[in-house]
Amino acid sequence: MSANDFSLDCKLDNQLDRLDSQLETRVETDLIGALEVPVDALYGVQTQRAIALYPLNGEKPLSAYPVLIKAMLRVKRIAAKTNLNTGELEPKIAQSIIQVINRLLDDLPLEQFPVHACHGGGGISTNMNINEVVANLVNRDAFFRPLGTYSPVHPNDHINLNNSTSDAQTTACHFAVIEQWQSLESSIDKLINEFNAQGAKWQHEQKIARTCLQDAVEISFADLFSGYQSLIERNKKRLNQGVIELYKINLGGNIIGRKGDVSQAFFESIIDEVNTQMYTSLFCHSDNLFDSSQNHDDLISIANRLELFARGLIKIAKDFRLMSSGPETGFAELNLPAVQPGSSAMPGKVNPTIAEYLVQCCMQVCGRCYTIQMTQDHGELDLNVWQSLVIHNLLDAMSCLENGIQAFTQHCLSGVTPNSQQNQQNIQTMIPTLIRLKQEKGYSYAAKVFKESQGDITKVRAHLIKDKQES
């Protein structure tokens, strides 16, 4: 070869290299056929196919749920370590998978998880999005192979080894809810503590109670707030009991609960590895793996309890809204912190916006939980395929409830003050006065006084003073 020919070949190679670097896509092939994938995407053909099939149109992608992505990654890491221990993965491959997942857990590239949060196939697009990202990173970083080669590490043959969408995603859903519960529980605890603090602060302040929206007896604000606090504590306990049930998992149950779809060694050791990596001893296999495939009622139970809690919080928030109504023609028993102007047209108007925000958050929670409940009705035969709908609505409901609770605790409850003058006037009205008279002389006597006084509160009070003097 002449020097000119060699120079020409070098120029041609350089041009080809520049052309390759300018390409915007690479071509990958799956069962359905060939498809173009963005050249620098860490995901692959099955993820790209899902992007095309399930357009977002403003709805949430998988990337909106990092807690679920990380839960899936932990499942894959647990599987890789177990497969390493049983000898079903080569050490170099297994260790590389674990290292890549550790990096992803520390620095998650959310843009690489673009599939629609809800899609057909029982969550397979979620599972394959995870599998492809991990496989591509392992091949690129540990074996110096181009993205999309899937050699020596394949998304199905290696990342998905001894697990499937069914058991991997179900287990990941449990992991995610357990983690999300820790954050929600913390906000609930702060709400409980604030009600307790406000009750202690205003324990000597009296207000009138009401039944059927009519005047009743006087109580203290400590009495009122203790009732709210008790409701919240009971619902927290109920939710916590539901979360404890999520430590039963079906990892190793594989496709529909058949243990034979994974190796015996994998099945027998997987729970120990789960507990080791999750730093607990609480996880165990579900009582019936086929049941775990057919039903998601353990997650649905959390939704039911969330909805019940949300309805209780709506009641509390609406009570605050009523008790602060006014300022001159309403109940005007509570002063809520003024956090923003209440009208664009009426000067001086301040609305109970934080209480209303909590109500709206709780309404959203109820709607999401109703959607979750519907998935039990439609889980036909051996696999309930609606788990994506369950987990994303459940995580959204928990997050929405936490937001509402935090705002109410910080911007409303912590700054609430009783309207002492109004409350003192209220507890000196007809019904409370008659109740005090009844306590002195009995129901019949108090009823007789009311009838004789013809509703004149001055005469009723006179009887009460007279009776006290005589006693």
Image: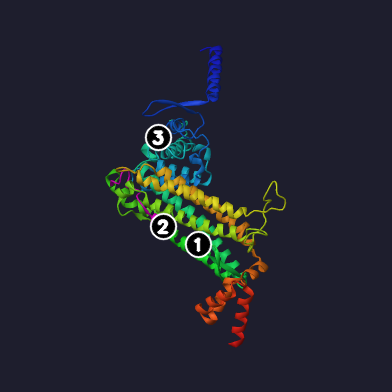
Mark 2 sits on what residue?
242
Whole-percent x, y for residue 184 in the image: 51, 55
Q: Is residue 78 visible?
A: no
Secondary structure under the numbered disc 2 in the rendered image: helix
Percent across and percent down for residue 470 are 60, 87
Nearer the viewer's eye, disc 1 or disc 3? 1
Query: Which callout, 2 or 1, points at the residue further toward the start of the chain?
Result: 1
Q: Which residue is mark 1?
A: 232
Callout 1–callout 3 Cβ contact below 8 Å: no
Question: Magenta-highlighted stretch: main secondary structure?
Answer: loop
How many neighbours does mark 1 have within 10 angstroms: few (below 14), some (14-19), or many (20 or more)? many
| Front one among 395 and 278 | 395
Q: Nearer the viewer, residue 76 or 145?
A: 76
Q: Position of residue 343 (x, y in %)?
A: 68, 48
Q: Nearer the viewer, residue 180 or 113?
A: 180
Q: Position of residue 151 (x, y in %)?
A: 41, 33
Report the residue at 57% width, 55% height from top. Answer: 406
Q: Secondary structure at mark 3?
A: loop
Report the mark closest to the observer, 3 or 2. 2
- In magenta, the rendered stretch is 245-258
Does residue 122 sit above or below 289 in this rendering? above
Q: Residues within 10 Å of mark 3 (few under 14, many from 20)?
A: few
Q: Is residue 250 magenta?
A: yes
Amino acid carrying label 3: it is: Pro
Mark 1 or mark 3, earlier in chain = 3
Q: CA distance from mark 1 to mark 3?
A: 54 Å
Residue drawn at x 31%, y 52% as measured from the top left = 268
- Label 2 – label 1 distance at C-alpha: 15 Å
Which residue carries the number 3 mark?
Answer: 152
